[in-house]
Image (tube, rainbow, N blue to C red):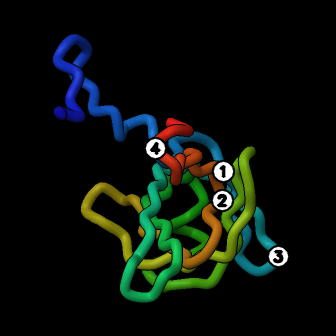
Amino acid sequence: MSTHDHRNGHHRHDDDGYRGPATLTVGDRELPVQALLDSRHEPLDGRMHWFGRLTGDDLAEALGHRAADAVLTTPQGRSQARVGDVDAWGRYRVSGIGTPPFGLPVVALDPDDA
């Protein structure tokens, strides 16, 4: 079964994760950001790993090119995060382990519930 919808050029997985406004709290500073986030369950450690990229006008001033511990908040939730390196497009890498700061799709464990 293909995950690509040829009618509109989107992948079904485009609806997973989170894309939208968020707040990054570093120390006592709250920074408005735009987030593109996704997650996956890591079978080796049995935990949820979430990750993505952040953009925002004040990120470079607040973080420069250093990594920082932070809290990322979206309208759907809040999680501890680690902000890392900057890519060629000026987006900051963000990641966390545990419950992501966005809703996860419900997965039916019983095929009869699907």
User: Is 24 left, or right, of 112 in this rendering?
Assistant: right
Q: Which residue is mark 3?
A: 28
Q: 104 or 26: nearer the eye? A: 104
Q: Position of residue 112 (x, y in %)?
A: 51, 38
If you read the primary sequence from the N terminus, does the residue marked by circle 1 or circle 3 appear first? 1
Q: Position of residue 49 (x, y in %)?
A: 48, 73
Would you say the residues marked 1 and 4 are in contact, meaning their CB atoms lie under 8 Å apart? no
Q: Nearer the viewer, mark 1 or mark 3?
A: 1
Q: Secondary structure at mark 2?
A: loop
User: Is 96 left, or right, of 5 in this rendering?
Assistant: right
Q: Secondary structure at mark 1?
A: strand
Q: Secondary structure at mark 4?
A: helix
Which picture quadrant has residue 65? bottom left
Q: Residue at x 55, y 53 (%)?
A: 56
Q: Residue at x 74, y 55 (%)?
A: 77
CA gap, disc 1 and disc 3: 16 Å
Graded by Cα atoms within 10 Å as few (under 14), some (14 to 19) or many (20 or more), the crowding at tag 2 reads: many
Number of the label disc, if any, that sits on residue 22: 1
Q: Which residue is mark 2?
A: 101
**Amino acid type at image mark 3:** Asp
CA gap, disc 4 and disc 2: 28 Å
**Amino acid type at image mark 1:** Ala
Q: Which residue is mark 4?
A: 111
Would you say the residues marked 2 and 3 are in contact, meaning their CB atoms lie under 8 Å apart? no
If you read the primary sequence from the N terminus, does the residue marked by circle 1 or circle 4 appear first? 1
When the figure is inspected, residue 77 is found, relative to residue 15, above or below; the finding is below
Q: Position of residue 43 (x, y in %)?
A: 39, 79
Q: Nearer the viewer, mark 4 or mark 2?
A: 4
Can residue 34 be seen by looking at this rendering? no
If you read the primary sequence from the N terminus, does the residue marked by circle 4 or circle 3 appear first? 3
**Amino acid type at image mark 4:** Pro
